[in-house]
Amino acid sequence: DAKTTQPNSMESNEEEPVHLPCNHSTISGTDYIHWYRQLPSQGPEYVIHGLTSNVNNRMASLAIAEDRKSSTLILHRATLRDAAVYYCIRTTSGTYKYIFGTGTRLKVLA
Amino acid sequence: DTEVTQTPKHLVMGMTNKKSLKCEQHMGHRAMYWYKQKAKKPPELMFVYSYEKLSINESVPSRFSPECPNSSLLNLHLHALQPEDSALYLCASSQGTPYSGNTIYFGEGSWLTVV
């Protein structure tokens, strides 16, 4: 069974870095790792994705373990607006399916 | 413009009613999706349309009936729903398959309450 697991919740102080972990131990070599976040009463919003190499964009960085069994989403300076549920997602080869992780609720403290 | 528009934002319907949820995207995406999300849970895939043809039906009860009139529009027809069908219904689209690295873009959702 393909499982993607994340901690239920995390807290961070404002303007400090946040590292959100994800375990996807059954990932195959061609499955992408995507991260989305969902603010209250909104649809999921794309954050970043990658395959093997670490990735950076204006929102975040994605660090992928060498064996690809885990990844970490890095928010460099958390703001109050970053408080959301963060989903780690893996794709599945040959299908349109996203395998959603359990989600981490991030709380940012002022 | 990476926007998926869903209407209505809120819908309350009785168990004998027939209603529809609508979704529109103008990004030229060829795949469109319906997801269902219950409180404090991740979204669950219901249907996928690829090039206007139904590609995936995740064993969804027949009281949910999807329709893709053209490449920009996706509807979800609702009939004889149960209270447990109350949830956030999310529409999404992507240029191609996620396993090729394509990103799925989600709408803001339609909140459905069945009374």
Image (spheres, helix red, strand yellow):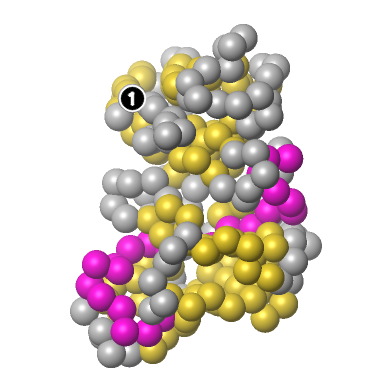
- Chain to which the residue tagged by mark 1 belongs: A
Q: Is residue B45 magenta?
A: no
Q: Quadrant of residue A101?
A: top left
Relative to A13, B115 lies left or right: left
Please state the horizontal and vertical placement of residue A24, each as a whole percent of the image: 48, 24
Say if A35 sits above or below A66 in the image. below
Please state the horizontal and vertical placement of residue B29, each as a whole percent of the image: 74, 60
Query: What residue does disc 1 label?
Result: A7
Q: Quadrant of residue A59?
A: top right
Visible residue check, residue A47: no
Q: Residue furthest right?
A: B28
Q: Quadrant of residue B54?
A: bottom right
Q: Which residues are magenta?
A: B78-100
Visible residue check, residue B18: yes
Relative to B74, B65 lies left or right: left
Of B14 and A84, nearer the camera is B14
- In the image, what residue occupies the spot 68% across and 29% down? A30
Callout 1 amino acid: Pro
- In the image, what residue occupies the spot 33% across and 25% down? A7
- In the image, what residue occupies the spot 28% across and 90% down? B16
- In the image, what residue occupies the spot 68% across and 19% down? A52
Of B75 and B99, nearer the camera is B99
Report how many numbered discs are placed on residues in the image.
Answer: 1
Say if B73 sits above or below A102 in the image. below
Please state the horizontal and vertical placement of residue A89, each as a whole percent of the image: 52, 36
